[in-house]
Image (cartoon, helix red, strand yellow):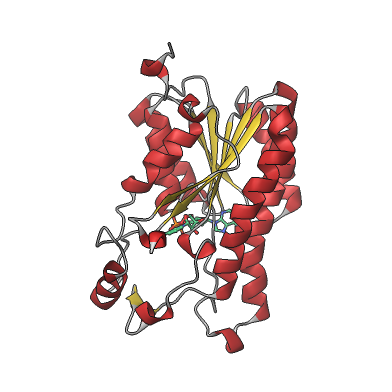
Amino acid sequence: MGDYKNIFNLRNCTAVITGGAGMLGSEFAGGVASYGANIALVDIDKDKCQNSAQELASEFNIKAKGYCCDITQEDQVNKLAEDLLNDFSSVDILINNAAVQPPGFFASLCDYPLSTWQKVLDVNMTAVFLMVKYISPHMKKRKQGNIINVSSIYGVVAPDQRIYRGAEYRGNQINTPLAYSATKGAIVQMTRYLAAYFAADGIRVNCITPGGVYSGQNKTFLENYSARVPLGRMAHRHEITGAVIFLASPASSYMTGQNIIVDGGWTIW
Ligand SMILES: NC(=O)c1ccc[n+]([C@@H]2O[C@H](COP(=O)([O-])OP(=O)(O)OC[C@H]3O[C@@H](n4cnc5c(N)ncnc54)[C@H](O)[C@@H]3O)[C@@H](O)[C@H]2O)c1
């Protein structure tokens, strides 16, 4: 019989979360910290990730530290991996969560600045490669590791352009640009590739695919979006976290290369 009472236990594990100061990253950190994981928050926003780490440490009685790092810069990621291993005895879980919306992000396709396109690719996709490049050797050495990538429904299906008529987020017109869909689609395929590549090294690699999360979208967008969702609404941020805890924990020990879609049913019709 399995030890089901401890199936989510993350004590003595360290989880590294990129974009750890952001909306979902901080939620994911709280989720895995609730099950005892020590936390390394990695973000370009120094104050926010260091303050959040302090709060996590005192709330959950764990070790937590914030690391200011631009994960698109190879030398910084290399140094980050060294610092992580000096500060924590191991890195057990890597959650590749960071994403960016640089200036020009919502421009229409034929006006899309190449520099914006490149920046989105750098953070959303290339940085995942860099994090894996520098963290996986340590996991390989220990013959255990767990990598969780974060995609989006727009990496799985095409955005329905109709929902953006009159849509605003924090006062700005929004849409889902090709750069976002392209990188999020790549993340799903990188998950499969990396899962197969590292399987013999005891490293699992899975992906979660969230649907849209409430975060200040205007009423028009909420109505347009909700009409497309079988469950009839956007997600609350805590509703995405259960899948992350599951993938981070021994509960999913026989899963690798999979993508868990948490979207209220958006992608089923
Ligand atoms: N919010 C949603 O509705 C939604 C839906 C589907 C998928 N997602 C995915 O979830 C993840 C988190 O999204 P979010 O809404 O919490 O975003 P967010 O903008 O709140 O957080 C992203 C974090 O990444 C950090 N970051 C950006 N560039 C960086 C860099 N170069 N180096 C280090 N850190 C950097 C930012 O500072 C920020 O704290 C993303 O991968 C996103 O694509 C979000």
| Residue 92 picture location, percent across and down | 59, 29
* Residue farthest front in this picture: 269
**Horizontal and vertical percent position of residue 113:** 63, 82
Where in the figure is residue 216, as x and y percent of width and height? 30, 66
Residues 178 and 75: in front is 178
| Residue that appears at 62% across and 75% down | 116
Residue ID at (71%, 55%): 73
Image coords of residue 265 (percent x, y): 35, 57
- Residue 25 vs residue 67: left or right? left
Residue 27's image quarter? top left
Using the rendered image of the protein, determine whether residue 235 is visible from the camera's viewpoint.
yes
Query: Does 139 appear above or below 205?
Result: above
Residue at image coords 33%, 30%: 59
Q: Nearer the viewer, residue 61 or 34?
A: 34
Q: Give the position of the C terminus as an image quadrant.
A: bottom left
Side of 202 where 65 appears, left or right = left
Q: Looking at the rendering, in which quadrant would you find the N terminus?
A: top left
Left/right placement of residue 261 relative to residue 95 reads left
Q: Nearer the viewer, residue 95 or 49?
A: 95
For the view shown, which residue lies furthest in the top direction?
1
Can residue 212 be seen in the rendering of this structure? no
Q: Residue at x 42, y 13 (%)?
A: 3
Position of 135 compared to 94: left or right?
A: right
